Amino acid sequence: MNSKFYTIALLTLAPLFLVAQSQYEVNKKTGTLKIKNLDDVEIIGYDGDKIIFTNVDRDQEEDDRAKGLKAFNVGGLEDNSGIGLSVVEEGNTIIVQEISNDNCCGCQDEYTIKVPKRMNINYNYNNNSGDDIKVSNVEGEIEITATHNDVYLINVTGPMSVKSVHGDVEVIFTQVSQTNPVTVASVYGHIDITMPSVTKANMNVTMNNGSLYSDLDIIVLTKNVNKNSDDSSTKKIDAKLNGGGVAFNLSTRYEDIYVRSN
Amino acid sequence: MTDLSTQLIDYIDKNLSAEEHNKVEQAIAQSPSLQAEYQQLKHVLLLMDTEQECLPSAELKNRFDLLLEQESQKIEEQKDGTKTISFHPKSLLKYAAVGLVLLVSGYFVGQNLPNSTKGNSIAQDIAQDKQFTESEMMEMLDGPSTSQRIKAVNISYKMENADDRIVEALIKTMQEDESSHVRLAAVQALENFPSNPKIVDALIYALETPNDPMVTIAVINILANTKEQKALEPLEKIAKGDTHLNFVKDEAEVGIFKLTTI
């Protein structure tokens, strides 16, 4: 009877124990979350005062073998979170880096990070491959630097500075902050922006080999702003949206730019 | 305002007796100014009927009631020895409402007017942008926010003849800013001052220095588009060397092609 009871209790509680092992929390409500070299990640803003890191697909077999041991990587970082991340606080910034030395596709763990929605996000990943980066419900400043990742920002406000060399960048604004510029750039990917039709903006659009598509009331002030260039393939446009407002800098070299109302 | 004009709203609302109605009708037909007033009022009242009801805040309503009461008292005080213009209370309220509607609709009509009539507001926006002084721009360039530093770089676009101090600040930003987004914005801003020889030298130096690939591509494009022959040698080094990613080497090849054949 007793052994059956303990067996059932252990089986019932085991999943909870495993979930608890995959999470790490930091008390932090404001400041910047700086994420370096973490490929597969989704960042979700929420009304809270903790940053909650979750390793979504932890390799349990590997964990069992490394039980009681601390992971280190070639950069000298240590897994101080217990879920494969180095999490360090420097001033008002939390710096997060993945410990794994596996850089092959599919080998790295997948993470979600819940952040107080007014925190600033700074994401940097420069590698020869890249998964999607998703950021949603964040009202702080967003800075993303990527090479191969597609970037999806959903229900955000800006300001932001986003660039991906090979990836597409898609942004859905709930509203557009008028404090500082929105800058989105790609070389080989498209840019797709959705925002309220009442958004006030000064748009600077560069599309060397693509086109701009929009259903918004964009007033073009100057075409081919690049007056110093003899290169006819370089297309730059200065435009006003709803009388002008925050600077909205969009550029892509080989693909199109879409700006639509939500 | 004439006696007849005070009856226009009741005329439009069909609240006049048959005799008064005919009298106003004839007056409108004979007086172009009254006809214009009639058309404006009719349009505004139509707008009032079709627009969604907008309820004022309790504070605004109280202040409006107080103002209305004060105006009524003044009219009472002025009765002796002065000509009295009779306002039907309902008409008075409607005129006040018409005034409010004209004010509000004027704002929104102004927002949505086509390009030709929008010049003034655009000029105002640009004037607002110019309010930043050189020293404010420098201060912003040292700020902690990436998007604010991009905003500072954007201010240089409004300066037709940037002095050496501005150019040097942009060059320093291109070379030293911790964010590749800001360095990229600085490169794009320097493109606007091609006559300054310091800029060409700084761009050539930037080609020879390890940098973010999108910054390097932007530098290649500027030098190639402006046919800067000094760029040929560093571009060949990039194209033939092993220090840059393949897509940067491809852009260097395109740059060499532009410099040597087009």
Image (spheres, rainbow, N blue to C red):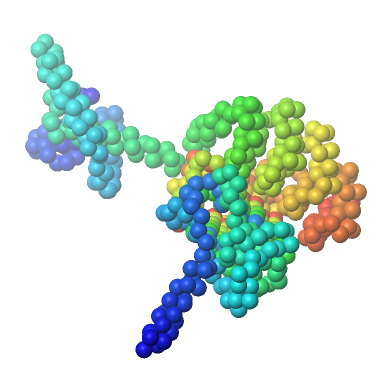
Residue at screen point 43% across, 76% down: A13
Q: Is residue B145 something one can see in this rendering?
A: yes
Nearest the eye: A93 or B171:
A93
Q: Where B56 falls versus A127 (above or below)?
A: above
Spot occupied by residue B200 in the image (x, y as percentages of width and height): 82, 38
Spot occupied by residue A129 in the image (x, y as percentages of width and height): 70, 66
Left or right placement of residue A149 versus residue A52 in this view: right
Residue A151, quarter of the rendered image:
bottom right
Left or right placement of residue A219 versus residue A148 in this view: left
| Quarter of the image that includes the N terminus of chain A | bottom left
| Quarter of the image that includes the C terminus of chain A | bottom left
Nearest the eye: B124 or A221:
B124
Number of residue marks: 0
Nearest the eye: B58 or A115:
A115
Residue at screen point 22% across, 37% down: B58
Residue at screen point 71% across, 58% down: A76
Spot occupied by residue B184 in the image (x, y as percentages of width and height): 70, 46
- Residue at the front extreme? A2
Q: Is residue A194 something one can see in this rendering?
A: no
